Image (tube, grey):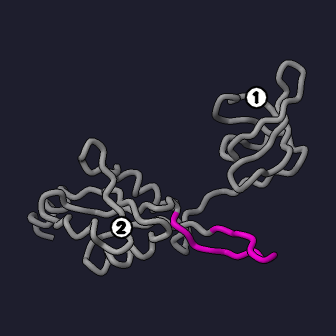
Amino acid sequence: MSSNTNKQNQNRSWYLVLTKAQSEFNAQENLLRQGYEIYLPLVQTSRRCNGKNIKRTEAFFPRYLFIYLNKETDNWSPIRSTIGVADIVRFGGVPAVVPEIMIDKLKMNEDEFGLQSFEKKEFKQGDKIEIISGAFEGYKAVFQKMKNAERVSVLLDIVGNNTQVTLSVHELEIA
């Protein structure tokens, strides 16, 4: 690799692209076709449809994907007019740089199928749990039920009274 190529890579950063609703794959395909380097983290989800569990591969970050660009030499103008793309995320008019370590961690978290792997927490009614983050961090509770894929209902003992509280599943672990 020449020193000129190394210098070009040193000036490259990951940026965040906002896609149109449910157009992550379309935007990815069209940006790749134009020669851009893209990273779209994926996750497999399961939904009930007509009484059947349907598995789908979706964007890990709905409506977002990452693009690797050289701020000085790459042509940014076609990106916003690419089919599926809404805009480049900016803060104060400046394109938002995504830390390289975040992209590395996302890539390291992929399983053999290129999907983000994460430990799915399976709780049963009556399980004793500990709250590991958030406003009630350190408290013990009793698991009641899943409200949806991300939220759970727990009974929290507050001053001798059991109070039903809704929390993120990510804030809990088995005690």
Does residue 126 lie above or below 29 as drawn? above
> Which of the pair 48/106 is nearer the observer?
48
Residue 127 percent across, percent down from the top left: 87, 44
Q: Residue at x 85, y 27 (%)?
A: 157
- Crowding at dot 1, Cα within 10 Å, few <14 / some 14-19 / many 20+, comes out as some
What amino acid is found at the position of numbered circle 2 in the picture? Val
Left or right? Give the position of 53 relative to 55: right
Residue holding disc 2 = 85
Q: Which residues fall within the magenta stretch?
A: 45-59
Residue 139, numbered label: 1
Residue 172, numbered label: none
Does residue 4 lie above or below 124 as drawn? below
Q: CA distance from mark 2 to mark 1?
A: 44 Å
Secondary structure found at label 2: strand
What amino acid is found at the position of numbered circle 1 in the picture? Tyr
Q: Main secondary structure of the magenta part?
A: strand
Does residue 54 lie above or below 131 as drawn? below
